[in-house]
Image (cartoon, grey):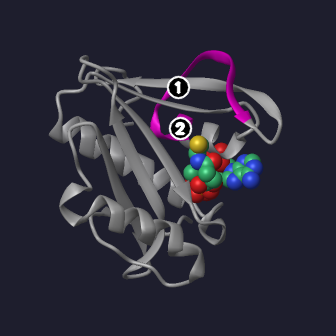
């Protein structure tokens, strides 16, 4: 069974690993966490603990959006990433006119690929050499979910 979580516009931290989140939240400012170009919400668990964050950003003039997520290590593998991304999808399709949401992840990030597929995203293809990390160019897998995809809302 997965832990429950909520995506919220609030600052919450319970341990040292949350410092990156606090720095980012301070620099964004409370009123700037949801913006026209990019947005940033905490993933809250355990009545206030910050498990990580979700983001989304505009893709040019199309009104379509790219989402992202990062959980602190101690919160991974408990169903929180799947639930948080499900909530982001619901929130964005409910409050924006976006027709398409997309997300990219490295080819060896099985947890994110499974989480996206669970939420209804479809694997669309490989983008070669998209990221440079730890001395290597990494391939990325692109996932997409359309508002009228049958998998949306399953
Ligand atoms: C990727 C991430 C968001 C996934 O969230 P999570 O809460 O850890 O994942 P969940 O517990 O919801 O599990 C999702 C699926 O991945 C599987 N999974 C979880 N951890 C895994 C691991 N280390 N290896 C392989 N599969 C894994 C789960 O079994 C589940 O699959 P299932 O639905 O078939 O049972 C989270 O691990 C994370 O923040 N990682 C670091 C940052 C990152 O990679 N961000 C995303 C891409 S940039």
Disc 2, disc 1: CB below 8 Å? yes
Q: Quadrant of residue 41?
A: bottom left
In the image shown, does 141 or 46 lie closer to the viewer? 141
- At 80% across and 42% down in the image, what residue appears? 134
Q: Quadrant of residue 45?
A: bottom left
Magenta run includes residue 60:
no
User: On screen, 92 above or below 65?
Assistant: below
- Residue stretch rendered in magenta on the structure: 116-132
Q: Which residue is mark 1?
A: 143
Q: Residue furthest right?
A: 135
Q: Which mark is residue 116?
A: 2
Magenta run includes residue 130:
yes
Q: Report the Cα–Cα distance between label 2 and label 1.
A: 8 Å
- At 26% across and 56% down in the image, what residue appears? 33
Task: Report whether 133 appears left or right of 79.
Answer: right
**Sequence-wise, which precedes: disc 2 or disc 1?**
2
Q: Residue furthest front?
A: 27
Which of the image's four quarters has the C terminus?
Answer: top left
Location of residue 10 in the rendering, given as x and y in whole percent from the top left corner: 29, 70
User: On screen, 111 above or below 43?
Assistant: above
Task: Report whether 33 appears left or right of 73.
Answer: left
């Amino acid at each position: 069974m997965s832990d429950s979580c909520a995506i919220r516009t609030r600052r919450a931290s319970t341990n040292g690993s949350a410092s990156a989140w606090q720095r980012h939240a301070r620099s964004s400012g409370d009123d700037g966490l949801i913006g026209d170009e990019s947005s940033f919400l905490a993933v809250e668990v355990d009545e206030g603990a910050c498990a990580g964050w979700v983001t989304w950003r505009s893709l040019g003039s199309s009104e379509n959006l790219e989402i992202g997520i990062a959980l602190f290590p101690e919160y991974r593998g408990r169903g929180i990433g799947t639930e948080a991304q499900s909530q982001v999808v619901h929130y964005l399709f409910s409050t924006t006119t976006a027709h398409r949401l997309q997300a990219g992840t490295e080819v060896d990030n099985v947890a994110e690929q499974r989480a996206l597929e669970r939420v209804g995203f479809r694997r669309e293809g490989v983008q070669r050499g998209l990221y440079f990390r730890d001395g290597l160019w990494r391939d990325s897998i692109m996932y997409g979910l359309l508002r009228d995809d049958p998998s949306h809302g399953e």
